[in-house]
């Protein structure tokens, strides 16, 4: 169903399912990065550091695609296409710690670099495809 995360696949956001995030480079070529992700009922949320390639790409062109594979069954997946509707630093440090708890089982994100500015990206789904 366009723009909606099907109920049958919302459990993927509770699992340690990585998302392959596709963004567009300045020349239009695709760039794909694995990311941790979250869903708040309306937006798919991922977190990164300001200045990384995906950050530059979505600030220039907000169109993205994401594919989440079920870690328990890789033939079950959810593909999401949409646009980054909001970019914010507010709450991003707390969010990356929440993601570290989910994905690593630790209370604090262990890979922070000195001077790094964390950013959250809210993706509004426009199209979804699911299998499995």
Image (cartoon, helix red, strand yellow):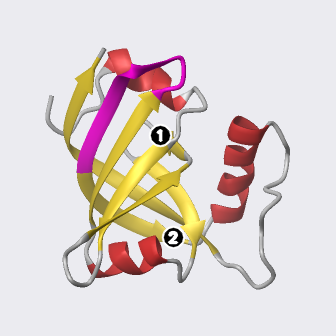
* x 34%, y 47%: residue: 66
Element at label 2 = strand
Task: Give the left or right position of residue 105, taking residue 25 as reference.
Answer: right
- Magenta span contains residue 12: no
Spatial CA distance of label 2 from label 1 is 15 Å
Q: Front-most of 73 and 99?
A: 73
Q: Which mark is residue 113?
A: none
Q: Over which residues does the magenta segment extend?
A: 70-81
* x 54%, y 25%: residue: 71
Residue 12, how many percent across, how many down? 47, 26
In the displayed structure, would residue 124 be above or below residue 42? below
Residue 87, how many percent across, how many down? 44, 69
Judging by the rendered image, the residue that carries numbered circle 2 is 88
Magenta stretch, main secondary structure class: strand
Judging by the rendered image, the residue that carries numbered circle 1 is 40
Q: Quadrant of the N terminus?
A: top left
Say if residue 42 shows up in the picture. no
| Residue 3 position by quadrant | top left
In the displayed structure, would residue 119 be above or below residue 110? below
Residue 108, how many percent across, how many down? 84, 53
Task: Give the left or right position of residue 82, taking residue 88 as reference.
Answer: left
Work out whether mark 2 precedes mark 1 in sequence or the reverse, and give the earlier one.
Answer: 1
């Amino acid at each position: 169903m366009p723009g909606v995360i099907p109920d049958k696949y919302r459990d993927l956001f509770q699992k340690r399912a990585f998302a392959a995030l596709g963004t567009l480079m300045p020349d239009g070529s695709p760039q794909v990065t694995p990311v941790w992700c979250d869903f708040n009922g309306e937006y798919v949320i991922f977190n990164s550091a300001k200045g990384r390639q995906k950050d530059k790409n979505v600030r220039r062109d907000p169109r993205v695609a994401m594919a989440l594979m079920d870690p328990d069954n890789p033939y079950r997946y959810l593909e999401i296409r949409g646009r980054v509707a909001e970019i914010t630093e507010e709450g991003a440090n707390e969010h990356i710690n929440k993601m570290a708890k989910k994905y690593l089982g630790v209370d604090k994100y262990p890979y922070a670099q000195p001077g790094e500015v964390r950013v959250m990206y809210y993706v509004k789904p426009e199209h979804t495809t699911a299998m499995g």
